[in-house]
Amino acid sequence: MLGEYAAEDGRILAGGQSLVPTMAFRLAKPAHLIDINGIAALEKLNVENGSLSIGACVRHAAFHRPALAGPLGALLTTVVHHIAHYPIRLRGTFCGSLAHADPASEWCLVAATVGADITAISTRGTRTIAAADFFAGIMTTALAEDELLARVNLPVLSRDTRFGFCEFSRRAGDYAIAMTLATLRLEGGAIVDPRVGVGGAEAFPRRIPEAEAALAGRAPNEAVLRAAADAAAHAIDPLEDIQADAAYRRDLVRAMTRRALARACA
Amino acid sequence: MSGKHDLVLSVNGRDYAVQVEPRRTLVDAIREDCGLTGTHIGCEHGVCGACTVLVDGAPVRSCLMFAVQAAGKAIRTVEGLATGDELSVLQRAFMEHHGLQCGFCTPGFLMLVTGVLEREPDIGDEELIDVLASNLCRCTGYQNIIKAVRAAAQELRTK
Ligand SMILES: Cc1cc2nc3c(=O)[nH]c(=O)nc-3n(C[C@H](O)[C@H](O)[C@H](O)COP(=O)(O)OP(=O)(O)OC[C@H]3O[C@@H](n4cnc5c(N)ncnc54)[C@H](O)[C@@H]3O)c2cc1C
Ligand code: FES
Ligand code: FES
């Protein structure tokens, strides 16, 4: 159906928690909406082959309690409480957040940081896109007009993975002005496999290799965490908007990164 | 896709046969087509929560749902809370604890909290406060809303 209507400005309607507001502002005026709510096959949320598979109709609220044991479940539950508000979380979907690709979307940050695989289907076939290749700009993704984002797969984190998340926003439930998600392991007193993702600060969330390099193999002490936070603040190309200018965003990224890392190492 | 659709909306247990454009939001259908004006409209883009209603038990922003999406579902609005002249436990608590001033936000808060307490009767205090942050109130400063909701939650748990 999307194949048929995409050319005539047909769009998927998932939770409607971003699309309907943009329609209310007349920023989007789609000619056709294809409502995917109630398609049982898209409601799947399960672990298969070492990854958590999240179908297109899985709502944010599915993560209010851990969806699986271990660090990934805990991470998702920590993060979900920063997304909008309770009623919006009952409707909005994980996959819809990725398709919408707001620079400050928490789920987009999670996808970029842990390395999600995104599955898109169309009448032309099925393809899997790595998160690192998925986001292309502010609210712009690698999805083609006629593609349905069918599911997102997140790799299950090993038992000894630690994580830290920190977000700054003006009011509870607002979009982040800056946020950092960090995951790492500690082996023999040294940081192993560090991942540092920053969101809300640039056109789309991404891992910051400079910050990860400042951590790998080092002891998790105050000086090392500070150096990594400084590296993240320098590495970004900050968005500027009515809420925050570039210098302020850099400062926030530094603070969010330091706190996220401190939480991960605590 | 234009033209009008015939559909039946079940609101507070009563069926309303309405004819709406696919573009019509649920809140507009409830107010204009069903004539139930207890549900308020504030921002019309999901921020304020004045339009909160229950759809199959879930509190949702009815300005962010289309009426056609609610066909066949059980919709509940503020008009359905009282039984005859008897206010619900939550409504009474709002009155006793001065949980409202101008009252514009009240239907939204009542439906939000009614839905949450039905779904999660044992919800913790912290989480309850997080839930109350979903809706905007410009008058009360929230303290009396929190008092009312705590009292109602307590009463419902011991009932
Ligand atoms: C007041 C308010 C505050 C909010 N705060 C936050 C916040 O802090 N953080 C945050 O991340 N989000 C926030 N949101 C947005 C919310 O999380 C949305 O649920 C989410 O951005 C989009 O998901 P959805 O399922 O509602 O998608 P929809 O609104 O239905 O769709 C959004 C877009 O994605 C497309 N789309 C959706 N699903 C698919 C799919 N499976 N395949 C292809 N295309 C698809 C649609 O066509 C549309 O263009 C907020 C929303 C509101 C109203
Ligand atoms: S009118 Fe629906 S949230 Fe404000
Ligand atoms: S009582 Fe006036 S807005 Fe809440």
Image (spheres, coloured by chain):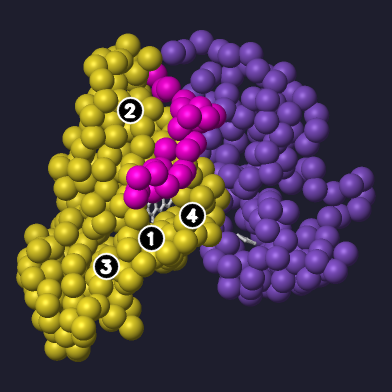
Chain colours: A yellow, B purple
Q: Which residues are magenta?
A: A32-55
In this view, A69 is above or below B143: above
Q: Nearer the viewer, mark 3 or mark 2?
A: 3
Q: Is residue B106 left or right of residue A135?
A: right
Q: Are marks 4 and 3 on the same chain?
A: yes
For the residues labelled 2 and 1, the Cα–Cα distance comes to 25 Å
What's the residue type where badge 2 is placed? Leu
Choose the circle earlier in sequence order: 2 or 1.
Answer: 1
Asked if marks 2 and 1 fall on the same chain, the answer is yes
Q: Is residue A157 magenta?
A: no
Q: Position of residue A64 (x, y in %)?
A: 52, 58
Question: Does dot 2 land on a helix, a strand or a loop?
Answer: strand
- In this rendering, the answer to whether B65 lies above or below A201 is above
Residue at which label 3 appears: A183
* Residue at the spot of label 4: A67
The picture places residue A17, in percent across and down from the top left corner, at 44, 42
Q: CA distance from mark 1 to mark 4?
A: 9 Å
